[in-house]
Amino acid sequence: MTAKTVLIVDDEAPIREMIAVALEMADYRVLEADNAQAAHALVVDHQPDLLLLDWMMPGTSGIELARRLKREEATAELPIIMLTAKGEEDNKIQGLEAGADDYITKPFSPRELVARLKAVLRRTTPRGVEDPIEINGLLLDPVSHRVSADGRALEMGPTEYRLLQFFMTHQERAYTRSQLLDQVWGGNVYVEERTVDVHIRRLRKALGDVHQGLIQTVRGTGYRFSARV
């Protein structure tokens, strides 16, 4: 298997070096940048598999770079882990809203970082687009556009189907209502955020008692699809 490439973006050289050593020992290829401009150029030229991005940097901050990358079509799917010295809830939510897939608070151990990085890569690696997806007896077939629960066909509208497909291919991550609108409805459609709640309610109802708990409400953020209680 080809080694995955990780771009480390941090203005502090000792931190970059510590992370680089840990990642190389875990068989990752490493690229380094000490500012957002250099990082953006490396992303475009080398297309890394994941970005480790420091929150606070001189000039353009990590959060601004994350927003820019998520806006651009070529880099919108690039997984990002924010490195931050701030553990406050507001900053975590801000990071997730900017499109980060995870965040890790300094100081952290290299082992924890590698474990989190592996988890993000595992869940953001695209599945075969036409492969059926099965979670806890809930089966979605993208080819026939059919959904079944424990072998029983489920009826749902086209928006609920698209919402479920997005959730099943993007598990274990909290999404804000505006992110769901962009991903499921498309960025050019004007729909109020509370519309998301209406369709979530319909989707839960369609999934029935056994599977509706897979769609979890994340207080203060939005929704997450998770098989974990």
Image: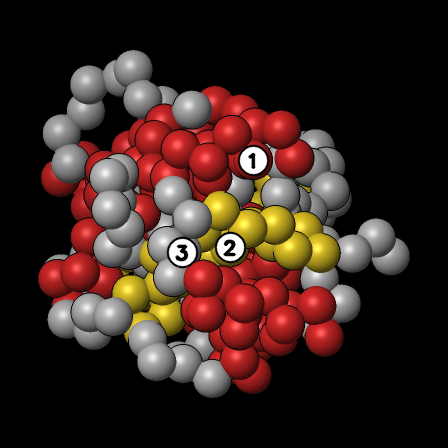
Q: Secondary structure at mark 3?
A: loop
Q: Which residue is mark 3?
A: 10
Would residue 84 be found to the left or right of residue 134 on screen? left
Residue 74 x, y percent position in the rendering: 53, 25
Amino acid, disc 2: Ile
Q: Residue at x 65, y 55 (%)?
A: 30
Examine the rendering and report whether any part of residue 225 can be seen: no
Q: Which mark is residue 1?
A: none
Q: Quadrant of the C terminus?
A: bottom left
Q: Amino acid at mark 1?
A: Leu
**Going by the picture, which residue comes out furthest to the front?**
13
Q: Secondary structure at mark 1?
A: helix
Q: From the viewer's perspective, is residue 33 above or below residue 81?
A: above
Where on the picture, by quarter, is residue 44?
A: top right
Q: How many marks?
A: 3
Q: Nearer the viewer, residue 214 or 183?
A: 183
Amino acid type of the residue tagged 3 in the rendering: Asp
Looking at this view, is 11 or 116 the one in front? 11
The mark that comes first in sequence, 2 or 1, is 2
Mark-to-mark CA distance, 3 and 1: 14 Å
Mark 3 Cα within 10 Å, few/some/many (few <14, many 20+)? many
Percent of width and height locating residue 151: 66, 59
The disc placed on residue 8 is 2
The residue under label 1 is 42
Circles 3 and 2: CB atoms closer than 8 Å? yes
Question: Which quadrant of the rendered structure holds the N terminus?
Answer: bottom right
> With respect to residue 101, does 58 lie above or below?
above
Residue at far top of view: 188
Helix, strand or loop status at disc 2: strand
111 on left or right of 177: right
